[in-house]
């Protein structure tokens, strides 16, 4: 009998194999160019660690619709690849061929037939152990840097924007947008009920949002031209900060729940290890009745990790749990993975609290959509 986890959760760290589905709609007459670009991409991705196989499929009903599926040993190697600058450069030739794309990622839970389960060097292991319980919410974040010295001007612009309509269509709506700054880095976290891509396109079309984007353009460290689709796509691809783990401790909390985004700068090639460590800590903390964290989402790209937490009461009421280092020597373990983490080795509670204060970002604005009538 299959056991369902009662806790709301998502995770890239359950060890299961990953199936990635990419739906594409090609421009008329672009098939030859697309196939050439795909062959280049296929040969390149075949050598990426963690990649098992892929398939290219064409619709039997509409020849302009294509499907690329790939299988990976687990989610982390795929995320490391898809979020890398190498991937950005590899898929760039596809952009001029494709009218629209949609990417879907699934953990493998069950499968039928040995032929589909066994690949060279691969066993039937690697299945998601049990279904997870979701809440219908997709969590995503964007991050980018602004020119040093412009932080106050950018914060003022971001704090003053008019929220777009929350309803996208009958199935999709914006639930929440939270904006933070840590030094000259901006982090924008969004929660969407329904289709993330539909919501992002909806937001991009709103004049009030475009006005804000145009206003901060002069302050960005990475130049972009939002009137140029390729420039805009490249900017938002590099700015993407995917959610790799989420857990909600249901039944906890109080009337006072505060949202914080904690910033963790990992040492080179340690970003995934930091994200995994924090995710494991949040799962353990969710079972602790003293845990003040109502919900936690870990976002990670390369060596940058952001942990978004909803805390019942003050952030520093329990610094170790808030920072994600509850337990013996956990602070030292995390400290070895962070650029500025040396002082966490053998840290006492005041040191942890001080480190927590330095990791906490400045909340610029937190917009929660009103419930639909």
Image (spheres, grey):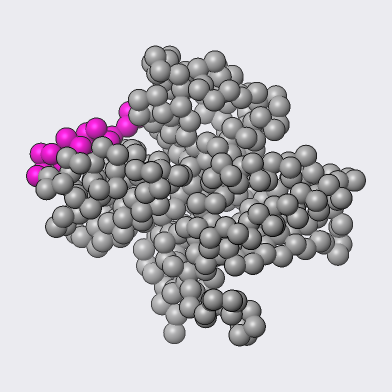
Q: Main secondary structure of the magenta part?
A: helix
Q: Who's the residue at 46% across and 49% down the image?
A: 243
As drawn, 145 above or below 256: above
Q: Who's the residue at 23% across and 46% down the image?
A: 335
Farthest right residue in view: 29
Pick whichever, 307 or 255, lies toward us: 307
Pick whichever, 347 or 20, lies toward us: 347
Q: Who's the residue at 49% across and 74% down the image?
A: 127
Which range is magenta? Answer: 348-364
Across and down, in percent, residue 298 comes to 38, 49
Pick whichever, 366 or 298, lies toward us: 298
As drawn, 121 above or below 258: below
Q: Is residue 292 visible?
A: no
As drawn, 70 above or below 1: above
112 left or right, relative to 59: left
Q: Is residue 98 visible?
A: yes
Across and down, in percent, residue 358 comes to 24, 32
Decide whether residue 150 is among the magenta residues: no
Q: Quadrant of residue 187?
A: top left
159 left or right, relative to 351: right
Q: Quadrant of the N terminus?
A: bottom left
Q: Who's the residue at 23% across and 41% down the image?
A: 341
Q: Quadrant of residue 361?
A: top left
Q: Quadrant of residue 276?
A: bottom left
Decide whether residue 355 is among the magenta residues: yes
Across and down, in percent, residue 366 comes to 40, 32
């Amino acid at each position: 009998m299959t056991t369902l986890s009662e806790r709301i959760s998502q995770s890239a760290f359950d060890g299961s194999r990953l199936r990635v589905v990419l739906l594409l709609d090609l421009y008329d007459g672009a098939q030859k160019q697309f196939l050439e670009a795909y062959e280049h991409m296929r040969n390149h991705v075949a050598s990426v660690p963690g990649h098992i196989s892929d398939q290219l499929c064409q619709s039997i009903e509409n020849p302009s619709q294509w499907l690329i599926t790939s299988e990976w040993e687990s989610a982390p190697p795929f995320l490391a690849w898809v979020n890398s600058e190498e991937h950005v450069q590899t898929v760039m030739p596809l952009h001029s061929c494709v009218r629209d794309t949609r990417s879907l990622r699934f953990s493998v839970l069950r499968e039928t037939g040995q032929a589909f389960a066994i690949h060279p060097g691969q066993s039937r292991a690697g299945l998601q152990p049990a279904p997870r319980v979701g809440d219908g919410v997709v969590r995503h974040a964007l991050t980018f840097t602004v020119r040093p010295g412009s932080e106050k001007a950018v914060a003022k612009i971001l704090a003053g924007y008019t929220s777009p309509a929350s309803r996208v269509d009958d199935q999709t709506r914006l639930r929440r947008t939270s904006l933070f700054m840590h030094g000259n880095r901006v982090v924008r976290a969004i929660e969407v009920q329904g289709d993330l891509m539909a919501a992002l396109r909806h937001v991009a079309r709103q004049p009030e949002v475009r006005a804000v984007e145009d206003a901060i353009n002069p302050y960005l460290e990475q130049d972009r031209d939002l009137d140029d689709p390729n420039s805009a796509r490249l900017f938002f691809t590099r700015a993407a900060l995917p959610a790799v783990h989420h857990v909600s401790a249901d039944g906890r909390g109080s009337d006072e729940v505060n949202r914080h985004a904690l910033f963790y700068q990992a040492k080179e090639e340690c970003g995934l290890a930091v994200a995994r460590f924090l995710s494991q800590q949040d799962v353990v903390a969710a079972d602790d009745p003293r845990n003040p964290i109502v919900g936690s989402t870990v976002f990670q790209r390369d060596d940058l990790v952001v942990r978004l937490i909803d805390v019942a009461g003050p952030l520093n009421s329990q610094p170790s749990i808030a920072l994600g280092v509850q337990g013996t020597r956990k602070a030292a373990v995390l400290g070895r993975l962070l650029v500025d983490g040396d002082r966490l080795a053998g840290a006492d509670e005041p040191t942890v609290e001080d480190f927590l204060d330095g990791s906490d970002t400045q909340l610029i604005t937190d917009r929660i959509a009103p419930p639909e009538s």
